[in-house]
Amino acid sequence: MTIDPFPLYAHTGPPSELWPSLRARYPSGIAPVMLDPHTSAWLLLSWETNKQVFRDPLEVYSVHPRWWREGNDGTVPETSGLKAMYRPRDNARHHDGGRHRHYRQALETALGAIDQRRLLTDVDEAADLLIARFAPRGWADLIEDYATQLSAMALTRLLSLDDEAGARACAAMRRLWDGGGGGDALHGWLDLYAVLVESAKHQRDVPGDGVIAGLIAAGHTDDEVADQASLIVSTTHDPGTHLIGNTLRALLTDRTLRGEVSGARTRIGDALDLTLVRDSPVRTLIGRWPRAEHRIGDYTIHQGDMVVFGLESAHQDLIDKSGLAHPEGAPAYIACDTQALGAGTRAHLAWGVGAHQCPYAGRDIATTIAEHAIGRLLAHLPDVALAVDSTALVRRMSLSINGLERLPVQFHPTSSIKEETWLSPARPSPSHPASATPTSPRTSSPMARLFQWMFREG
């Protein structure tokens, strides 16, 4: 049978609107797709197929990109954003078996050593600083003015990066997540790798107290530290930004949920779990390569095929199959009945399942940062409301990241919030000059200039 893959990259509408039509077209829960003009893959669409592959033993699947047939036989060009994102790296994400356990243990130990009380004090101070800057004017964009910046500031604390390094890492990672072709994503990886290696070299001389220091203590080389720390950057900045942003969107548009949180009947942590089910910040995640031919749904999957987790589609499928009520004409995954679903649900796949699921310490850090960010904002600006109709909110056009481009709000202006002084970790020692690795001119983009303003002293 000839398989005609669906050209996923050519879809121009919101990705979230695509998944229901694909589930209808491919009822067995898996679809042959083209991620770009060169890269074929199998996209898992249903709750059942995503859960099955997450749970299948790693004798069937590998997470190591060396098994990616098209990535290694020249089919996918070096300038591909996917090739940049999924190069073999020495970290817990890209190894199986004993090597995976070695890297995962080092990462879990480093994350577990983070002083969460101090981190959250820092997050609260950063939140107060950011809110104090826009509170007097009575309006803000909660993505650019708040969630993006707060996630970046938390990242600098987790890795003990200086402000410039944090800005470079976040800007580079966004380019990787969006998978730009023409070498842009590759330049993003080179810049991210350079800044993490520089920070590893610096912290060997001047030890920090974050994850990089913990990985050095575990005996990692500078290259291994950079590969492992890239996982923290990938999960902290963009997904963290939009976990905050998507939950705030829900609180600003779902009066029932807002009332439950305001009345302390539902915890913010439960609202975050609800967001991870119905508006997860990660849409798709390239996850596995089969070691041998086997069958999923209606299709035979061959050794070395790329298999992609469709997390947003799986969550939509879960909600649709639950039969939950939602307003006529509204997408079930956004407008499902809050009480029927249960704000405290843990049914989402956002953290993964099985041997490669996210470490519990990492989950706790991510959700607690988001919880404090949202709680601080609602405490300081209790009357915050959308400044536009909810239908005017624009989604980021990314097949990987699900979030808003902007979240404009308005509130009663106030000057009563004390603006804290954010003190970033020390800059790298002059004994370790900047890497000569070429970087893209986009590091001087508006986002980079925004970070320079964000981390200004005083």
Image (cartoon, grey):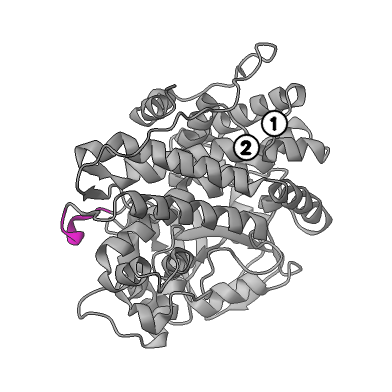
Q: Are marks 2 and 1 in contact (CB under 8 Å)?
A: yes
Instruction: Please tell me how crowded label 1 is: few (under 14), some (14-19), or many (20+) other residues with Cα within 10 Å.
Output: many
Query: Considering the image in quadrants, where does the C terminus appear?
Result: top left
Residue depicted at 33% across the width and 28% down the height? 446
Any magenta on residue 87? no
Residue 43 shown left or right of residue 200 in the figure:
left
Please, what secondary structure does the residue beneath circle 2 have? helix
Please tell me the numbered disc located at residue 208: 1
Q: Nearer the viewer, residue 30 or 257?
A: 257
Q: Position of residue 427 (x, y in %)?
A: 59, 20
Residue 299 shown left or right of residue 184 in the figure:
right
| Circle 2: residue type | Leu
Q: Position of residue 344 (x, y in %)?
A: 48, 75
289 relative to 232, above or below: below
Residue depicted at 69% across the width and 23% down the height? 202
Q: Which residues are magenta?
A: 388-394
For the image shown, how many numbered marks are present on the structure? 2
Quarter where residue 126 is shown: top left
Q: Position of residue 69 (x, y in %)?
A: 63, 54
User: Most extreme residue toward the top, as rendered?
Assistant: 430
Please, what secondary structure does the residue beneath circle 1 have? loop
Q: CA distance from mark 2 to mark 1?
A: 8 Å
Residue 55 shown left or right of residue 317 in the figure:
right
- Specify which label sits upstream in the sequence, 2 or 1: 2
Kindly identify which residue carries mark 2: 159
| Circle 1: residue type | Gly
Residue depicted at 22% across the width and 79% down the height? 327
User: Most extreme residue toward the bottom, as rendered?
Assistant: 323
